[in-house]
Amino acid sequence: MSKVCEICGKGVHSGRKYARRGLARAKGGAGRKITGNTKRTFSPNIQRVRTVTDSGAVKRVRVCTECIKTGRVRKPGALGKRRLPEPEAQAELAPVAAPEPAPAPEPEQETEAP
């Protein structure tokens, strides 16, 4: 099974797992020492999701959870709040700029008494 997101292309990355021992210097020890390191892989959280393609067909794709959360995937039969707006409607739903705050009143100047 492929571990690559079909939308953003996020895939497996390699790295290391460090084994440490000892007490930290801040806690009164001699410091943490690395006693070994092992190669490992970091896998993206890939899910199989039913999506609606641009042509309207329903298809299963492997997608990372970040793409699902950000709304890059359009799910079939979504109702209510879960329904994603069409691209044309998104422009209408764009946030409106906040009105500018009113200018602060100028402080009154003191006049000298004769």
Image: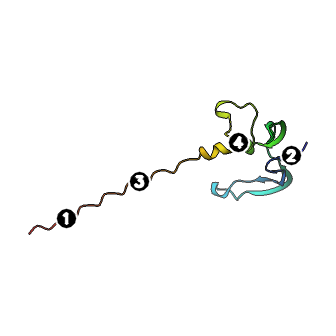
- Mark 4 highlights which residue? 69
Label 4–label 1 contact, CB within 8 A: no
**Within 10 angstroms of label 3, few (less than 14), some, or many (20 or more) residues?**
few
Tell me whether the residue at label 4 lies in contact with that at label 2, contact meaning CB atoms closer than 8 angstroms. no
Q: Are marks 1 and 3 in contact (CB under 8 Å)?
A: no
- Could you say which quadrant of the image residue 64 lies in? top right
Q: Which residue does the image show at 23% across and 61% down from the upper left?
A: 108
Q: CA distance from mark 2 to mark 1?
A: 74 Å
Label whose residue precedes the other's in the sequence (4 or 1): 4
Q: How is the image coloured?
A: rainbow
Q: Which of pointers 4 and 2 indicates the residue nearer the eye? A: 4
View extreme (right): residue: 1
What residue did someone put label 2 on? 3
Residue placed most toward the observer, 43 or 39:
43
Q: Which residue is mark 1?
A: 110
Q: Residues within 10 Å of mark 1 (few under 14, many from 20)?
A: few
Mark 4 Cα-neighbour bin, 10 Å: few <14, some 14–19, many ≥20 = few
Element under label 4? helix
Disc with the residue nearer the chain's start (4 vs 2): 2
Disc 2 vs disc 1: Cβ atoms closer than 8 Å? no
Callout 2: few (<14), some (14-19), or many (20+) C-alpha neighbours within 10 Å?
some
Residue labelled with disc 3: 101
Q: Nearer the viewer, mark 2 or mark 1?
A: 1
Q: Is residue 27 left or right of residue 47?
A: left
Q: Percent from the top left, x then y, of residue 76?
A: 76, 33
Which of discs 1 and 3 lies nearer the camera? The answer is 3
In what quadrant of the picture does the N terminus appear? top right
Point out the tag, 2 or 1, that comes first from the N-terminus.
2
Q: Residue at x 80, y 43 (%)?
A: 63
Q: Distance of mark 4 from mark 2, alpha carbons?
A: 18 Å
**Residues at marks 2 and 3, CA–CA distance in whole angstroms:** 50 Å
Closer mark to the observer between disc 3 and disc 4: 3
